[in-house]
Amino acid sequence: MRSLVILTFLLFAAPAAVFAQQDAQYTQYIFNGLVINPAYAGSRESLSVLALYRYQWAGLDGAPKTLSASIHSPIGDKNALGLYIENDMVGVHNRFSAYASYAYRLQFNNNARLQLGLTAGLLSYRSDWTKIEDIQDPTDPNFSNVEDSKLLPNFGLGAYYYSDRYYIGFSVPHLLKSDLDDVSKLSKYSQHYFLSGGYVFDLSPSLRLKPSFLLKTVAASPPQADLNLNLLIKDMVWVGMGYRTGDALVFLAEYHMAKGLRIGYSYDFSVSKLSPYNNGSHEIMIGWDVARSKPEKVLSPRFF
């Protein structure tokens, strides 16, 4: 259980680690955009359903495990709605989130769109200190209660501009700062800022290359960047690799099946100070894009 205590302290006390885990981390962020940007809602131009499971730092006691699900769709030409839920477990702490999103969509003559998004919802935090009861000191106020919980409202904003070849987005998913002393004993929940972008190049009729990035920052911590390079083969199979600064080398693949079904897998090879204590991170994704009945001037397949 000692590793559980160390992990809990690192994630909720050390400034750099707080940045990494206050918002759940995803390697397949390109295909899971609603969790970081409410303006992503409806951008796949279909009813899009997605479920994702991430097991971070496998083999480390108390390592983060995240399960998320989202659904979003355009509503007419100008509007889009979305919903996502997320359950994130780290050490003795559990965070459950449920958010509804709205995006206003502007169409431009160059076949590009600008979407402006708003999200609002609730975050439920719970800490179960019985998981480390074998070393619990009754006189230590950090471990004085068996279980603590807190329910917090929050809201966020985002913008997402995309065309058939590129996208760029900026978001602040949780604008309200929250004091979690009643729950984690060691941390505050801070604003997170996300800047993302990508471009698709044609290499041949059957090959496309897509570089992309995600820049993440939060107060009192250094920025972190995800830098990825993906190859699309015959508009069916994505294969790629990337680097998350100070954290991991990543490898991913996604396969587009018939009738809008897609599955994806990614593996992160840790290069941080935790690398000797874990076996990497795994992420599994399954999605389904249901075509709209009304013909639209959209791209198929979608690259983002």
Image (cartoon, rainbow, N blue to C red):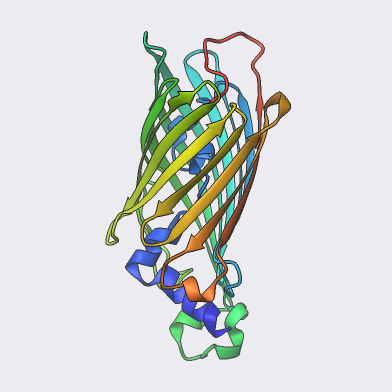
Residue 181 can be seen in this image: no
* 288 or 258, nearer to the observer: 258
Above or below, comparing residue 268 to residue 133 in the picture: above
Question: Residue placed at 46% from the left, 72% from the top?
Answer: 274
Query: Toward which corner of the image does residue 282 lie, by quadrant?
Result: bottom right
The residue sitting at 44% across, 69% down in the picture is 11
**Residue 186 % position (x, y):** 40, 72
Q: Quadrant of residue 155?
A: top left
Residue 116, given in percent of the width and then of the height, sits at 39, 27
Task: Find residue 216 and report its horizontal and vertical position in percent.
Answer: 35, 49
Q: Is residue 132 above or below residue 85?
A: below
Location of the N terminus (image quadrant): bottom right
Identify the residue at the far front of this view: 204
Which residue appears at 52% of the width and 23% of the height? 80
The answer to whether any part of residue 280 appears in the image is: yes
Q: How many marks do you count on the picture?
A: 0
Give the x, y percent position of residue 27: 50, 49
Residue at 37% over, 60% down = 19
Residue most toward the right? 258
Viewed as shown, does residue 161 lie left or right of 282? left
Q: Name the one closer to the observer, 178 or 228.
A: 228
